[in-house]
Image: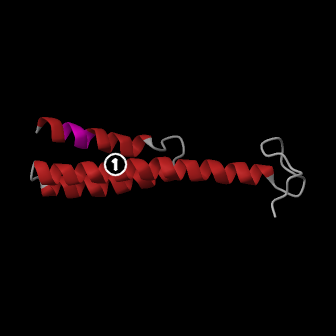
């Protein structure tokens, strides 16, 4: 049964490590942001390959998005911005090439 005596969102109980919970949550959110950016890059790369028939450019976009995702994961200050740059470049190639 669920414990109805506690109120969520008020405070952590003494048995819980609130700082660790918050750190884990921030890490998960950062991972989801970066992974979403990388997947958007993959979709744009598939569009570049399928619409423009530039498969080498699409492969390069996939590889660069993976590298950018790793850079974003290891450098928290950069985060989701690294895959976003690759996504913008792929979108520009798709629009103007």
Task: Indicate the position of residue 37 as horizontal and vertical percent values.
Answer: 39, 47
Q: Is residue 71 visible?
A: no
In magenta stretch: residue 73? no
Q: Is residue 91 magenta?
A: yes
Identify the residue shown where x is 81% and y is 55%: 17
Magenta span: helix, strand or loop, mainly?
helix
Residue 37 shown left or right of residue 96 in the figure: right
Residue 42: horizontal and vertical position, in percent? Answer: 29, 54
Q: Is residue 8 left or right of residue 47?
A: right
Task: Locate residue 3 relative to residue 68 in the image: left or right.
Answer: right
- Quadrant showing the C terminus: top left
Which residue position is annotated with label 1? Answer: 40
User: Quick check: 1 above or below 29?
Assistant: below
Residue placed at 74% from the left, 54% from the top?
A: 20
Q: Is residue 4 above or below residue 1?
A: above
SS for callout 1:
helix
Say left or right for 34 vs 15.
left
Q: Is residue 26 visible?
A: yes
Tell me the residue at 21%/54% (across/down): 46
In this orientation, which residue lies closer to the viewer: 85 or 36? Answer: 36
Q: Nearer the viewer, residue 89 or 10?
A: 10
Q: Residue at x 54, y 48 (%)?
A: 30
- Tell me where the magenta segment starts and ends, as one range: 89-93
Q: Position of residue 96 (x, y in %)?
A: 13, 35
Question: Is residue 35 placed above or below 91 in the rendered structure?
Answer: below
């Amino acid at each position: 049964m669920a414990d109805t005596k506690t109120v969520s969102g008020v405070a952590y109980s003494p048995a819980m490590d609130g700082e660790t919970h918050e750190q884990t949550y921030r890490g998960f959110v950062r991972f989801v942001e970066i992974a979403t950016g990388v997947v958007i890059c993959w979709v744009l790369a598939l569009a570049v390959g399928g619409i423009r028939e530039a498969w080498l450019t699409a492969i390069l976009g996939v590889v660069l998005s993976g590298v950018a995702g790793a850079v974003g994961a290891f450098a928290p200050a950069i985060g989701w911005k690294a895959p976003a740059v690759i996504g913008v470049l792929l979108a520009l190639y798709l629009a103007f090439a």
